[in-house]
Amino acid sequence: MGQLSLFQWLSATAKDELTPAQKHMYTSEKLDNFRAISKLCATRSSYTLTSKDVAPADLYFDLTDLGEFAQIAFNLPDPRFLFDNLEMFMQPGYPFEGFKALRNARLVSCFQGTVADVPGVVVYRPGIKQLVVGFAGTANMKQALYDLNFMKRRHPFGDGYVHSGFYAMYEGCKGQVIDCLKKGFAEHDVQQVAIVGHSMGGALSYLLAIDVLAGEYPMPPGVTVTVATFGCPRVGDAALSEFWQQLVAKYHAANGEASVKDYSMKGLNDGVPCLPPVSWGYRHIARTPLYLYHGRLFHVPRAEVEHGIFTVDKEALDHTRVPDYPRGGHNYYGRDAEKIMRRVYWLDRMMSRKTEGWQEEYLAKMAELERVK
């Protein structure tokens, strides 16, 4: 983005550090990116991320692909309509422009929970025989109120305690999700299951993964399980984290060391992973914490998982390009979720008029809103 070299960008002053396109992007923000929460609540690690911590490019691309399904899990638009009109939605100027994994996926089913209307989607990726469960992040006030219910309750399995609000929302959709999994296995040759979510959806992803590995919905022998979360808050206490480690170890013993992988990506200036606070007895449970900084993904030592701010050695950055999202934030995990949601809103609005030429009106509106001045 822009014509600056990375060196010029890193050397720029705070006043002129952004390209015109970046300035337009940030002035167009409507959603909360939790940067203020990050400044208030995130703790800084004493560990400096260097070139030796850079994650393999293949992992970054795999997680970017899975992130597409966390995005469509909001069920905006309705997944059935989306998959019936996939080519339109992926055109330049349309909401899912630039998505790659979505093009070859097949819809299995979608669901909406009975508690706070939590939406989600299940798709099948035939090329890699992967069934993907996607949980949406917070999208309405009811969900936000459950997010803020920081009281802990005992998890049904093990000795750990879990966030009461997250667990209530998970229980409200658990039965539907398991039915969707059964449908996916009945209709397709499944060798992998991926459970993905952004923000609150990441918390629900871990709760489903715990149930899956605990035997609530046993996987056929040899099926691998991947959990991928983006901007995920803390889900439970240290005992729940330990229980997760035990479940993974047991599954590994039965199915091999590569049979369970979990990745929790937190980004620059995203305050959501700082919540609920450690001082309230909460801990992250991720076995593979990751940190996204200026378009480069880093492995974080497990001992540093509770921290939200890291010093990054400049030599570890990509010197060939300017970062797309230099200010970070909760809605910038490899893509501009603000832009996607804005396009979805206007597409739905233009289509609802049911007038001829609505596509031209829509594209003209997007050109107006996204024009860099």
Image: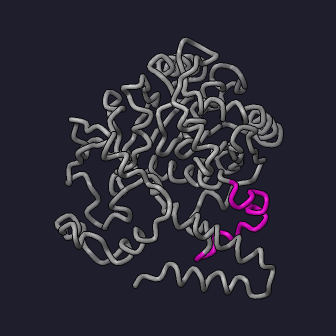
Q: State the residue at coordinates (41%, 50%).
A: 34
Relative side of 118 to 160, left or right: right
Q: Residue 293: give x, y in percent of width and height.
A: 33, 52
- Asked whether residue 246 is drawn in magenta, I would say no
- Locate residue 284: give its quadrant: top left
Q: State the residue at coordinates (30%, 41%).
A: 53
Q: Residue 276: give x, y in percent of width and height.
A: 44, 33
Camera-nearest residue between 264 and 35: 35
Rendered position, 208 above or below 87:
above
Chain part drawn in magenta:
75-93
**Quadrant, the C terminus:** bottom left
Rendered position, 188 above or below 97:
above
Rendered position, 257 above or below 130:
above
Rendered position, 263 above or below 155:
below
- Locate residue 290: give its quadrant: top left
Camera-nearest residue between 128 and 60: 60
Q: Residue 341: give x, y in percent of width and height.
A: 58, 64
Q: Residue 21: give x, y in percent of width and height.
A: 38, 76
Relative side of 107 to 251, left or right: right
**Quadrant, the N terminus:** bottom left
Q: State the residue at coordinates (57%, 79%).
A: 366
- Asked whether residue 86 is drawn in magenta, I would say yes
